[in-house]
Structure formats: structure tokens, C-alpha cells
Image (cartoon, helix red, strand yellow):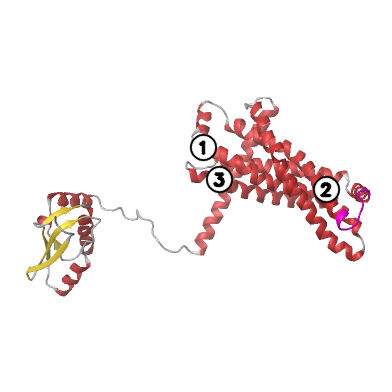
Amino acid sequence: MAGPGELLLRQPSEDTLTLVLSGRWNLGEALPSAEEVRQKVESAPQLRQIAFDTEKLSDWDTGLLTFLTRLRKLYAGSQIRLDSSGLPEGARQLLALAAAVPEEKGARKAEGKVSFLTLLGNETVGFFQSGGELLEFVGDATVAFWDLLRGKASYRRSDLWLIMEACGGQALPIVSLISFLVGLILAFVGAIQLEMFGAEIYVADLVGIAMVRLMAAIMTGIVMAGRTGGAFAAQLGTMQVNQEIDALKTLGISPMQFLVLPRMLALALMMPLLSLYANIMGILGGLVVAVSILDISFIEYYNETVKAVGMWNLWIGLFSSAVFGVIVALSGCMRGMQCGRSASAVGEAATSAVVTAIVGIIVATAIITLATNVLGI
């Protein structure tokens, strides 16, 4: 059995170098490199031709073709000519086929560092494109909601109830935990400062106003962004990958009405209820700190909370939670509808939906807070 491929250099004349190939020139073998040939050629400046002797070549595959291709690239454009007449017929045909269609210039991506201004410009263009896509999606959702008010929206009522259950009752455990701990933390932070002035009773004011006016709505919105917004994006993204959304369009069914509208309605309806529940849990968290650490009785804490928390605070919190619900639903559905046609794109859509929803909640909070301060409420 022949051994692995070997290369012997022979120079029958001053202008010709013969490469004697023997053994098995297979890709898995330790084959000679073109570097030996290059060194020999550099030591003989009168060389004008490289020939091949393959009489002792027992077997070959792409390992031989790789060697020959490197030689051809090494001396392309030079005065040295490669004489392939001594090669096997199959190798000559494959080399000719590879040379018949040259590589298109610029087909490979140019590697190199991108300048800061280029990155900044690309990010700016992407930002405005995303803004345009967001406005377009919000417009389509508004049209779908208007069709609902006119009684012309096509969606299944059973889907609405199932989504309300998924983003309402099933979210109570995580909302309970987060809201209770937030109320606990607010009470601890307030107690440290208020004890310095002997005003421990105002812990009830701090926890009650903070939770009812804003914190309950914000924390519930963030929890729902991670829990429900990401789920909406994954669901619609998977439907996009499986071409189910394309099938709905083919059947003349609007995806905005059939898929987005019930999700938006469900979150807009359930978020205020979850926010009310979060208010109670947050106030209970503050009560635990007040009773166990500050020696404030249950009745004192209750009376101070009722006196401090007004109806305006409650209405602002409920309005904020409804807005946050719409933002979470729109973010999840928009990223799901924009999802690509691969499994990795579904994960990217879910991540993007959570980030978009949280950013939207923070921006909406800033706007609502500024508007209430201007209005004096």
C-alpha cells in the first residue's frame, strides 16, 4: 500500500522545474506545502516553467487540488507558467472548471475597522428607521382599534379571554412578590431617615403615595414586559417563522385585528387590575416594616395611609398602568411581527421586545410625571 503523499523537486533544465508527486495525496494526509516549491523557485531565477510528474501518484482527492490551487495563485501574473499536462485527467478538468468562473471582485466582505463616524451614521439611520416602523405599527393598531369600536374587527373572543387569563390571573404570584418586596424596601429606606426626626409615622405616607401613584404601576409594567411582552414576541415570531401570518394574509384576515388587537385589549384591561393588587401588596410590605421595626400599630398605619393617599394618586396610577399595558403589548407584538425567518430571530425578537417595552415604560413615566406636575395634580 502506498504511503502518504511525497514531493520531489527535479530540475532537468535551467528554465524548467519538475514536481514529482508520489503516494496518496488525500486531504486527511500530512501533505507537502507549496512553500518548498517557492523556495526552490526563488533560488533559481531563470525558471520559466513548472511541470508535473504523476506516474507514481497512487491516489488523490481535494488535497492535491488544494496544493495545485495554491501554486496557481502563487505564480498568477508572473513569468512562470504551470504545465499541467503531466497531471491526471480528472485533476486537469477540475482545475479548468475552477478557473473558468473567476471570483467576482468585491464578493467577499472587506475586513477592516469601521470608523466611529460610520458607526454613528449607521446607528442614526437605524434609529430613524425604527422610529418610522414604530409609528407605522402604532397607526395600524389605532386603525384596528377603531374597527373594533365600529364593530368591524375580526378576532376570536375566546382568544381574548385566554390572553386575559394568561396575563392576569397567572401573573399574580410574581406581581405579589415584587410589589411586596418593593413596599418593604421603600419602608426600610424611609424608616432610616424618618427615625432621625422622630417622624416614623410618615413611613405610611411614603409607601402609600409612592406605590399608589407610580411604583406599583411601574413595577407591574416591568414585570409584564419581561413575562408577557417577551411571550407575545416569541409567539408571533414563531408564527412568522412557520408562515402562519402569511397564511392569514392570504385568507384575507388582518393580522393586526386577529393577533395584535386581542393582546393589546387584554393587557390594557388587566394592567389596572394588577396595579390595584400591587398597591395592596406594596402597602402590606410597608405595614410589616412599620409594625415589626417602628412599633407603629396597624390602626395608626391604616389611618395615616388613608389620610395621605388621595383619589388623584389612585387615578394617576391606574391611568399609568393602562398606558404601560398598551406599551408592553405593542412592543411585544411589533417585534414579533418584525421577526426574521429563523429560530435565532425569535430569541432576538423576544429580547428586543422586553428592552423596547421597558424603555417605553420609562419614557411614558417621565411624560406622565411632567404632565401631572404642570397640571398640579
Nearer the N terminus, badge 2 or badge 3?
2
Q: Position of residue 7 (x, y in %)?
A: 15, 64
Instruction: Decide whether residue 32 is among the magenta residues.
Output: no
Badge 2 element: helix
Q: Amino acid at mark 1?
A: Gln
Q: Nearer the viewer, mark 1 or mark 2?
A: 2
Q: Position of residue 375 (x, y in %)?
A: 84, 49
Badge 3 element: helix
Which residue is the extreme one toward the front?
A: 1
Horizontal relation, residue 138 to residue 108: left or right: right
State the quadrant of the N terminus: bottom left
Horizontal relation, residue 332 to residue 74: left or right: right
Q: Nearer the viewer, mark 2 or mark 3?
A: 2
The residue where tag 3 is placed is 349
Q: Amino acid at mark 2?
A: Leu
Identify the residue shown where x is 81% and y is 58%. Answer: 188
In the image, the segment drawn in magenta is: 290-299
Q: Position of residue 258 (x, y in %)?
A: 60, 30
Q: Amino acid at mark 3?
A: Ala
